[in-house]
Amino acid sequence: MADENSTPRPGQLANQTARLFIRAIDQALKPLGIRSGQIPVLLALRNGKELNQRALIEIVGIEQPGMVTLLSRMERDNLIRRTPDAKDKRSVRISLTDEGEEKSARVPEFLEEVNNKALTGFTTLERSILTALLDRIILNLENKE
C-alpha cells in the first residue's frame, strides 16, 4: 500500500489486487484440492475437450517449462490424463479425468464467490466501469506494435 506522501501507481495497485485475488481464489478452492494456476487448464479442457500441450501453452500463456510442471502436478493429482496422439506419435493429447471434470464444473461458482466478495459495495454501474477500464488497460498493454 502506498504511504500518505505518494500517489499509488496503477501498476502497483493492479499487482497488489492480483496477488490478493489469487490468495482469495486459492483459499476458496482449497476444499476442491486445486489451485488458481490450474484453472485455465481445467476450463480449457472442460466438457471432454482434448488438447495438446502446445495448444494449452497458447491458451494459458505460460512458458513450456511451467506448463510441463503444471501438467505433471495435475496428472499426479488425478485431474488430467495424457494419451498418445494417433495422428502425431511425438505428441500427446491431454484431457480431464472424471475427477477433473467434476472439479472443473465447480470452479465458476468459487470464482463468482471471490468476485462478489471483492466487489462488495460496488454498484452495478461501478462494476461495469471497473471491468471496462481493466479491459482497456489489458488491450493497451497487449498492443504489440
Image (spheres, helix red, strand yellow):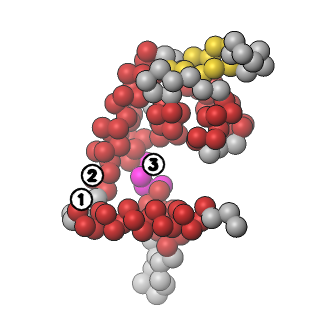
Query: Label 2 sits on what residue type?
Result: Asn
Can you identify the residue that label 1 sits on?
A: 120
What is the secondary structure assignment of the residue under circle 3?
A: helix
Relative vertical location of residue 88 with respect to residue 134 in this rendering, above or below: above
- Give the prevailing secondary structure in the magenta stretch: helix
Question: The C terminus appears in which quarter of the rendering?
Answer: bottom right
Q: How many marks overall?
A: 3
Label pair 3/2, CB-CB below 8 angstroms? no
The segment highlighted magenta reads 19-23
- In magenta segment, residue 49: no
Locate residue 59: give its quadrant.
top right
Residue 59 visible in the snapshot: yes
Q: Residues within 10 Å of mark 3 (few under 14, many from 20)?
A: some
Question: What residue is shown with label 3?
Answer: 22
Tag 1's secondary structure? loop
Report the residue marked by disc 2: 116
Q: Earlier in the sequence, mark 1 or mark 3?
A: 3
Q: Nearer the viewer, residue 122 or 57?
A: 57
